[in-house]
Image (spheres, helix red, strand yellow):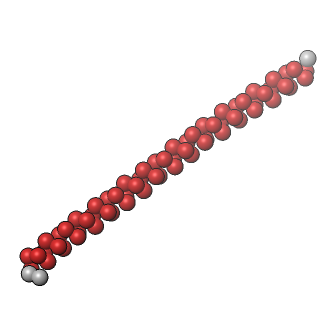
Amino acid sequence: MSLTQRLYLFTAMGFGLMIIVFDLLFRSWNTLNIAMDKVDYTQRVGEIVNQLQLHIFTKQGASADL
């Protein structure tokens, strides 16, 4: 194999490796964003549930006073 062919092969393999690395980074970033969205959604639902429980307990306390 000549030097030129080796350089082309090295360049092509380096480019392929960079594509793989960027693909892995993109997929990891995307997975992290999806996980963070789920955490945000879970926290919002938890806050709403807590507000609803507080509302129910205050209504029960108010009706028990009657």
Instruction: Tell me where residue 9 sits by quadrant.
Output: bottom left
Residue at the spot 23% in from the left edge and 70% down from the top edge: 13
Residue at the spot 13% in from the left edge and 71% down from the top edge: 8
Of 19 and 51, which appears nearest the observer?
19
Residue placed furthest toward the front: 1
Left or right, residue 50 beside residue 37: right
Image quadrant containing the C terminus = top right
Q: Picture coordinates of residue 20 (x, y %)?
A: 32, 63
Left or right, residue 32 beside residue 8: right
Vertical side of 6 occupied by 26: above or below: above
Q: Picture coordinates of residue 64 (x, y %)?
A: 90, 23
Residue placed furthest toward the top: 66
Vertical side of 18 occupied by 5: above or below: below
Disc count in the image? 0
Q: Picture coordinates of residue 21 (x, y %)?
A: 33, 63
Residue placed furthest toward the bottom: 1
Residue at the spot 63% in from the left edge and 37% down from the top edge: 45
Left or right, residue 36 beside residue 49: left
Of 52 and 4, which appears nearest the observer?
4
Image quadrant containing the N terminus = bottom left
Residue at the spot 60% in from the left edge and 37% down from the top edge: 44
Instruction: Tell me where residue 60 sits by quadrant.
Output: top right
Of 27 and 59, which appears nearest the observer?
27
Q: Picture coordinates of residue 22 (x, y %)?
A: 32, 59
Vertical side of 64 occupied by 26: above or below: below
Instruction: Tell me where residue 17 sits by quadrant.
Output: bottom left
Vertical side of 66 occupied by 31: above or below: below
